[in-house]
Image (cartoon, rainbow, N blue to C red):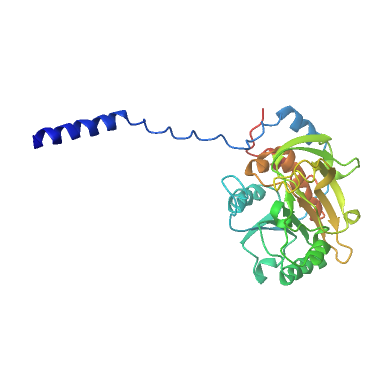
Amino acid sequence: MRKAIVLGTLLVLGGMVLAADPPAEQPKPQPPKHVAPPPRSRAEVEAILAKAPKSDRPVRHLNILLVAGPKDHGPGEHDYPRWQKEWAPLMSKADHVSITTAFGWPKAEDWNGVDLAVFYLKTKWTASQLADIKAIQDRGAGVVTIHWAIGCDQEWDNHANRFGMSYRAASFRHGNVNLKLAEKEHPILLGLPKEMQFVDEPYWPFIGDKSKVDVLASSDEMIHRGDDARTPGDDKVETIPVFWAYEAPDTKGRVFVSIFGHFMWTFDDPYFRLMLLRGMAWAAKDDVYRFDKLATEGVEMK
């Protein structure tokens, strides 16, 4: 009798197991929120390059310092080490340049003889760091900041004096951006389309006097509808600077600022490269088009 009861219990339990719901399906991986834009047209890029004036004047030797820092975002975003690893050999292909690198804030000896310093990192921008920038600007060296390098944790007015404007982490938007060039003649913009589509990240608002910088390109943004979405439903649109040039009135130095550079694919966009490379040469006070040939180096085009 006892054996029968046990057997019956096992049969019931077995039936319960058999009758149980099948395991829930695992959620399918979601596609990435943002994807790389399609390649640019080779014919259109080559047509832009062909418009650059030829110069018989020999270019001067430039000592270029590339400054990066620890990665601080997800895959393919803010990859400062990868940028430095790829752009040091890229820039070395230019004529008459010496490339040095610093990871984290440069040491005192790193500044020796620098004609152009390019920053792609997140740093605090302390008074001491800004004093280093002013010191090289005082002797005429150029400075370039890319994306988060314009973000400042303190000394905002001092920072704005060095770079034209400053950014205290506030509003931003990731995604498709319609970049519009300024309606002006500037050597950095020569031949580029008046409007270009990118997938990147603009910031706003900036600290400083916008009238003191030469805004080269901008985007129209719903300033209360960014990824921070602090005021959903407010459709107020403002024109936000994305690229600008600046000549500090208290120094001999020039500055070029790119807000784009969030996604690593932007660095392989020949239109972006042209603006960045020309901005670097402009900041160094040399032939603006001396690095143009690097805009297509290793870049996929259609």
Q: Is residue 188 above or below residue 63?
A: above
Q: Residue furthest front?
A: 1
Give how far across and how far down residue 44 sits, in percent: 76, 29
Total marks shown come to 0
| Residue at horizontal 88 percent and vertical 67 percent from the top | 250
Observer-nearest of 37 and 245: 37
Vertical arrangement, residue 146 with respect to residue 156, above or below: above
Q: Does 113 sit above or below residue 185?
A: below
Q: Residue at x 67, y 43 (%)?
A: 267
Specify whether residue 59 is in view: no
* Image position of 92 (left or right of 288): left
91 relative position to 30: left or right: right
- 138 or 263, nearer to the observer: 263
> Which quadrant is the C terminus positioned in?
top right
Image coordinates for residue 67, horizontal then vertical, percent: 66, 59
Q: Position of residue 35 (x, y in %)?
A: 62, 35
Give whichever of 295, 62 is nearer the camera. Answer: 295
Answer with the quarter of the image where residue 176 lies.
top right
**What is the quadrant of the N terminus in the image?**
top left
Q: Position of residue 102 (x, y in %)?
A: 62, 61
Residue at (71% x, 52% y) in the render: 146
Residue 254 seen in render: yes
